[in-house]
Amino acid sequence: MNDDAKTDLVSRRGFLGVGSAALAAGMLSAVDAAGQDQKLYPTKTDRSATAPGPGNSQLDAQNPDSFLPPPTDAGGVATFKYPFGIAHKRMQEGGWSREVTVRELPVSKSMAGVDMRLTAGGIRELHWHTAAEWAFMLYGNARITGLDADGKSFVSDVTEGDLWYFPTGIPHSIQGLNSDGAEFLLVFDDGNFSEYETVLLTDWMAHTPHDVLSKNFGVSEQAMRKMPLREKFIFQAAVPGPLAADLKATSGSQGLSPVDFAFRTAQQPITKRTKGGEVLIVDSSKFKVSTTIAAAIITVHPGGIRELHWHPNADEWQYYISGTGRMTVFATGGRARTMDFQAGDVGYVLKTLPHYVQNTGDTDLKFLEMFKSSFYQDLALSEWLTHTPPELVMAHLGIDKATLDAIPKDEVVVMPK
Ligand code: MN
Ligand code: MN
């Protein structure tokens, strides 16, 4: 890292509220209730910000809280960040796919994610899997198809901000539409999931004797001669025609599925809006079919913070859409780690561990929180402290009544600067 970058990091640390002089001295101190100086980090008096050895200045600049951790960080905490940008990208004609699973991010045992791109006409082939699939449209337009558990057809067009959900074993497909196809995030309710191990139509057909297919379909073996010999996974095709035509063609004698596997977030009222930002919570209370994944779509304005909180019911799988932020996960027993996040990063927080997400940039920070649960649930530190006998709280924290009274009584989700 060059000197300019180092200076920038140190001044930025100051901006974030920790004096660079204190860092240079290698310790923080505070005055306790009895007026006595408490040395918070007495063993780190030789702490220094310099790093003269080999380094990657661009990586350091993107990860200031790793380059120079806040003094409140301590001990080993399992890594909870993995950028899609360094995940293997499976390239196909018609699009690509990359995944972040428990293999890339070992802490993420309960959920996994896939970032997928389809060109206009590009098809993610007909398939299903052992995990349920929750999706968020990041860009463009796509047509999704499915078959419900009663054998009725579902076809819908989705656009940026829309969601879909296909339960375990429910077959589906995705195809990019005009003008430039789509990119979307898929989240699965199993950290061990892999896009490479789904039940694919072409893979299945390629591994079934043609005389069996012939009997099964009541057609000649000759008619099967062009069946692919291996899976297609993603492939290029023509852009499909109007949605109405596909709906008509698939309704058959049974009619279309009454189940809506898609969800339009743009048509939903924001769940909570404060000066600091806003949150839209989407769980099975609104998106009925999404029984194993609950989500919160969060926007934090510059200077704002997604307040200190935890989730009693599930691990949190995060995807950062835009802006920059940092998150500290307090992992009990004196352990805490702060990591920085950019667009395209995956974050993960184990069930019940306290955390916050702070906007560290000058544009809106937008990210997704997903949980393997039918319902969204969180508790905020402020909520806890203001619904506990005041004397009890003050005895713990050494704060006076005026300070306690100033703490918000209700969960605010996103605190303003
Ligand atoms: Mn799928
Ligand atoms: Mn959270």
Image (cartoon, helix red, strand yellow):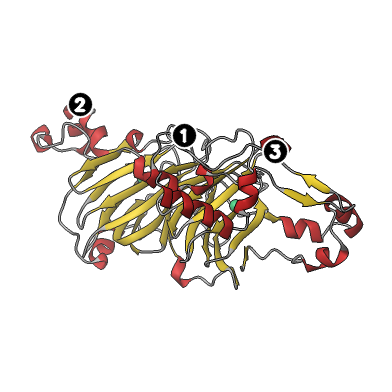
Coordinates of residue 348 in the picture (x, y in percent): 53, 44
Q: Which mark is residue 240?
A: none
Task: Name the residue type under label 1.
Answer: Val
93 left or right of 400 in image: left
Task: Name the residue type under label 2.
Answer: Pro
| Mark 2, secondary structure of its residue | loop
- Of badges 1 and 2, the one in the foreground is 1
Vertical relation: 198 (above or below) 249:
above
Mark 2 vs ligand 1: CB below 8 Å: no
Lower position in the chain sequence, tag 1 or tag 2 = 1
Q: Which mark is residue 209?
A: 2
Q: Which residue is mark 3?
A: 332
Residue 291 visible in the shown view:
no
Mark 3 near mark 1, Cβ–Cβ under 8 Å? Answer: no
Q: Residue at x 67, y 53 (%)?
A: 309
Lower position in the chain sequence, tag 3 or tag 1 = 1
Q: Residue at x 39, y 44 (%)?
A: 57
- Of badges 3 and 1, the one in the foreground is 3
- Of badges 2 and 3, the one in the foreground is 3
Coordinates of residue 19 in the picture (x, y in percent): 63, 55
Q: Residue at x 65, y 45 (%)?
A: 25
Q: Which residue is mark 1?
A: 102
CA distance separating discs 1 and 2: 35 Å
301 left or right of 82 in image: right
Coordinates of residue 98 in the picture (x, y in percent): 33, 42
29 left or right of 236 in image: right
At label 3, counting other C-alpha atoms closer than 10 Å, the crowd grade (few under 14, some 14-19, many 20 or more) is few
